[in-house]
Image: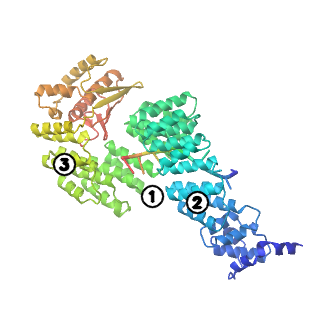
Amino acid sequence: MLHSVCLASPLHSPKLKASINGTSEVPNTTLLHHFTSPYELKQAVAFLIKTNKPLSLLPLSRVASICALTPDFPFAQQIFSSVDQQEVSIWNSCLRNLAEGSSLIDAIFLFHQMRSYNVSLDCFTCSFVLKACVGLRDLLRGRIVHGYVEKLGFPSNLVLLNALLHLYATCGAMADANLLFDKMPQRDVVSWNIMITQLAKKGDVGGAFDLFEKMPERNLRSWTAMITGFVHCGKAKEAIRLFVEMEETGLRANEVTVVAVLAACADLGALDLGRRIHEYSNKSGFRRNVHICNTLIDMYIKCGWLEAAKAVFNEMKERTIVSWSAMIQGLAIHGHGDEALELFNEMIKMGMKPNEVTFLGILHACSHMGLINKGREFFTSMSRDYNISPQIEHYGCMVDLLSRAGLLQDAYELITSMPIKPNAVVWGSFLGGCRIQKDVKMAEEAIRQLGVLDPLNDGYYIIMSNIYAEAKRWDNAARVRKLMKDRGVKKTPGWSSITIAGTTHEFVAGDDNRPQAEQIFKRWDELLEQMKSKGYVPNTSVVLLDIEENEKEKYVYRHSEKLALVFGLMNIKPGETIRIMKNLRVCEDCHAAFKVISEIVKREIVVRDRNRFHCFKDGFCSCKDYW
DNA sequence: CTAGGGTTAG
C-alpha cells in the first residue's frame, strides 16, 4: 500500500529524476537542511527519492530562495507541486525578502521569473514587487506591474492602489498620482498620508497642508507626516505649532514624531522645547533609538549646547555614520576643529567607514582652523583611500579653506580646474576670502561670475560693496548698491533673537520701538564706558555708508545682536549662558564688542550666526577670530 | 504574522 502511494507521488516523476541525473554522490542527511546551491539541493532530493521519503521534508523557503534567480526555477516548481502548499505563497515570501532587503533588482527579476514560468500571481506578489519598484524609483517597471494589477483582476484592492499611489508620487509622477487619488473608489488614511508626504517632499507644503486639513480622519502618522513636511520646507515654526495642536488632541508622539519635532527645534534653535522633547523621549523609552539620538546631537549642536550633544553621543551604545558625522560637523562649527579631527581618528580606529558628509565636516574643521595642508591631505585622501569622489560641496569647502587662508591664487586655480562646474556657493566662498584678503581685483572676478550664477542673492553684492568701502572706493561701493537696486535685489534685513522663559524676542538694527528700548540703550551706554576702558574701539568699517565717523558709531551701537545681548543681560539671571541667534553673519564690530563684554559681565555668550557658532568667554571667542 | 503610509548628519 505504502509502496503504491510512493509510486503515484511526483517524487518519482521522470522529469524530476532526469533533472537530478548526474548526482552520483550519496548526500549526508545534513544536506537536507543546509544545501546552499541548486546542485546540493538536487543531491538532497536524490537522497529523499532513494530513501523513499517525502519531499516535504525539505525547507521550502530555502528551496525557493536558492532557485529563484536561477535557471533551476522549474526544478523548484516541480518540488512545490508535490507539497501541500500554494506555490505562489512560497515564491511570495521569497520575493518579499528580496524586496525588503537590498536586492531590489533581484526582486524584479524573480517577479519576471514567476511570470515566465506561469506562476499564478496574486495581490501579494504585486504588492511586494511594487515595493521593489518604489525602492528603485523604477517608474517604468512600476507601470508594467500596474498593468498586471488591472489584468489580474484586483484593480480595486485598496492596499494595492495605495502602493501604486506611493509609487507614482515617490517617482515624481505627480500627475499620475493625482489622477489615481482622484478616481480611487475609496481612500483611507494611508492614501491621504501618502499624498501629504510626497507633496511636502516636492516642496508643495501648501498643497500638503490643504489635504491635511481636508482629510476625514487623521492618525499619528498623518500628523507626523505634516510636521516633517513643514520642517522639510523650512517652516519649523509651523511644525512646532502643529505639534502642539497634535498634543492637544491627545495623541502621543512616537519615535518618528520626536525626530521631526527635534529637527524643528534644531532649525529654530529652540533649546527649551528641545530639552522638553528630550525628556519626553527618555520617559517614553526611546533612549536607545539611534535616529532620535542622532537628531538630539544635531539639535543640541544647533542650539549651541555642545556639551549636551557630547553627552548624548557618549551615551550611545550603537552609533551610525550619521552620529559620527553630526558630532564631527558640530565640533567644527563650534570652533573645536582639533577635537573634530581627533574624533575622526577615533572613528577610523573603530572601523567605521566615513562617507561624503563626514568629509564635509572634516574639511569644515580644517577650514575653520586654517589647517591648509591637513585640509589638502583629507581632500586627496577621500578619493584615494575611501573611494569617495568630491562633490561640489567639497570643492566649496576647499575653496573656502584656501581663500580664507589667503591662498587666493590656489583657490582660483582649484575653481578653474575642478571637474564640476563651479556654482554660486563656490564663487561665494572665494568672494568671502577676497574680502578677508582685501583683494579687490579677485573679488571683481568673483562678482562677475556671481552676477550670472545667482544674481538675486543680496549677500554677494553686500560683500562686494563692503570690499570697496573698506578700500575707501566709495564710488564703486555706491555703484554696486545701485546695481542691486536696478536688479531689484532686496537686502535681507538682519535680525537677532534671544529666548527668555520660553518667549523669543527678535531684534532688528536700530530697534527703538519696543518695550524696554530706553533701558536697553541706557544699559548699553554704561557698558560702553567699561568697554572703552578695556580698550574697545568701535570698528566702523562695517558701515557701508559714506558718512561722518560719529554717525557711523551710532549705527554700529544699534546692531541687532548688541540689542539682543543687552536685553539678555538685563533679563537672564547672572551666571547663566546667554544664547543669541542671528540670521546673517555676525559683524566684526559686534564680535570684538562681545569678547570684551564677556569679560566684563563674566558670563558665557553663545552666538549662532548663519555659518557657525561663536562662544565668547573671558574676553575670547571660540572661533579664535578666524571665521 | 503574506500586503500599503511618516525618521537622522551636508
Mark toward the viewer: 3 or 2: 3
Q: Which residue type carries mark 1?
A: Gly
Q: Is residue A289 visible?
A: no
Q: Is residue A290 above or below residue A251?
A: below
User: Residue A549, image x and y in percent?
Assistant: 11, 28
Residues under labels 3 and 2: Cα distance?
A: 52 Å
Q: Are marks 3 and 1 on the same chain?
A: yes
Mark nearer the N terminus (2 vs 1): 2
Q: Are marks 2 and 1 on the same chain?
A: yes
Left or right side of A100 for A199? left
Residue under circle 3?
Answer: A448
User: Residue A305, image x and y in percent?
Assistant: 39, 36
Q: Is residue A164 visible?
A: yes
Residues under labels 3 and 1: Cα distance?
A: 46 Å
Please rate how many residues cluster around mark 2, counting C-alpha atoms within 10 Å: few if below 14, some from 14 to 19, many from 20.
many
Element carrying mark 1: loop
Q: Which residue type carries mark 3?
A: Arg
Mark nearer the N terminus (3 vs 1): 1
Q: Nearer the viewer, residue A211 or A388?
A: A211
Mark toward the viewer: 2 or 1: 2
Element carrying mark 3: helix
Q: Are marks 3 and 2 on the same chain?
A: yes
Residue under circle 1?
Answer: A351
Q: Residue at x 40, y 53 (%)?
A: A346
Quarter holding the C terminus of chain A is top left
User: Residue A427, image x and y in percent?
Assistant: 24, 49
Residue under circle 2?
Answer: A98
Q: Which numbered dot is residue A572?
A: none
Left or right side of A490 for A183? right
Q: Which residue type carries mark 2?
A: Leu
Where on the picture, by quarter, is residue A272? top left
